[in-house]
Amino acid sequence: MKLHASLIAAACALALSACGGGSDEQASTPASATTPAADPAAAPATGTGAQQTPAADPAPMDGGAATPADGADAAAAGAGPDTAAAGTAAAGDASGEATVTGCSVDVSGNDMMRYDVSSITIPSSCSEFTINLTHVGRLPEAAMGHNVVVTSEADMAAVAADGISAGAEAGYVKPNDDRVIAATDMIGGGESTSVTFEVSKMEAGGTYRFFCSFPGHAALMNGTIRIG
Ligand code: CO
């Protein structure tokens, strides 16, 4: 029996138009044709259109995929804004935006190789800006040194690399590096330091980064700094 079914299926597969398509059309056509007598002209047209639509969908896979995606978007449109709003709110809470007081900000670094903030906005009214860094950990500078270096986003990687080359004696910041907008001393657990710089070194709307130039730290210890 199964063999027969397989053979029939295979035969149908070889002659899809004759088997499946033909019988289906014949099965549905009478049903729809029964109802509207004037529709036959429109019914076939609709049928043809419906057949062409799925036929056209597989051809452009992107289009085919986009169609259900659009449908899903439309269906989830109600939940979309809620999700987005929740995401925005969560991002805001977790953004680590530093509290700027006047024209200065307090930043801390810990023994877990982390700053306590990930975003600093300098008030546009400030001509100078001060970054106060406190190492709240206990590890010594040689093992878990932290500093704060400010550069453009584009310069960050190269400045960090050159800092490592400059070595510990240079505080892992290349001396007289014009790309460095500001840099604190390198400190260890329990220590504090600060740096004040001219905000005019930064452009409003520019993308800048602050990071720790201790070898291996910049990947985790970095954040955005901009003029608000
Ligand atoms: Co560090």
Image (spheres, rainbow, N blue to C red):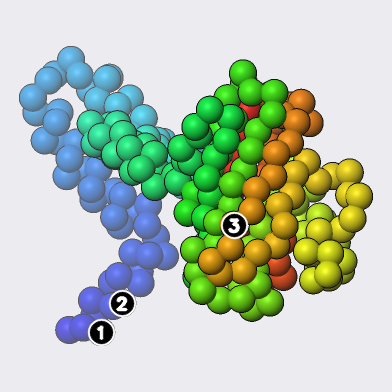
Kind of element beneath mark 2: helix
Q: Nearer the viewer, mark 3 or mark 2?
A: 3
- Identify the image quadrant of the C terminus: top right
Please state if 83 lies on the left or on the right of 226 as rendered. left
Mark 2 residue CB less than 8 A from any atom of ligand 1 = no
Kind of element beneath mark 3: strand
Q: Earlier in the sequence, mark 3 or mark 2?
A: 2
* CB-based contact (under 8 Å), mark 3 and mark 2: no
Where residue 26 sits: x, y (%)? 21, 43
Kind of element beneath mark 1: helix
Residue 217 shows in the view = no
Query: How many tags in the picture?
Result: 3
Please state if 48 lies on the left or on the right of 148 as rendered. left
Where residue 197 sits: x, y (%)? 73, 36
* Residue position marked by numbered label 3 in the rendering: 192
Please state if 154 lies on the left or on the right of 93 as rendered. right
Q: Is residue 198 above or below residue 177?
A: above
- The kind of residue tagged 3 is Ser
- Which residue appears at 23% of the width and 76% of the height? 5
- Which residue appears at 55% of the width and 62% of the height? 135
The picture quadrant where one finds residue 95 is top left
* Residue position marked by numbered label 2 in the rendering: 7
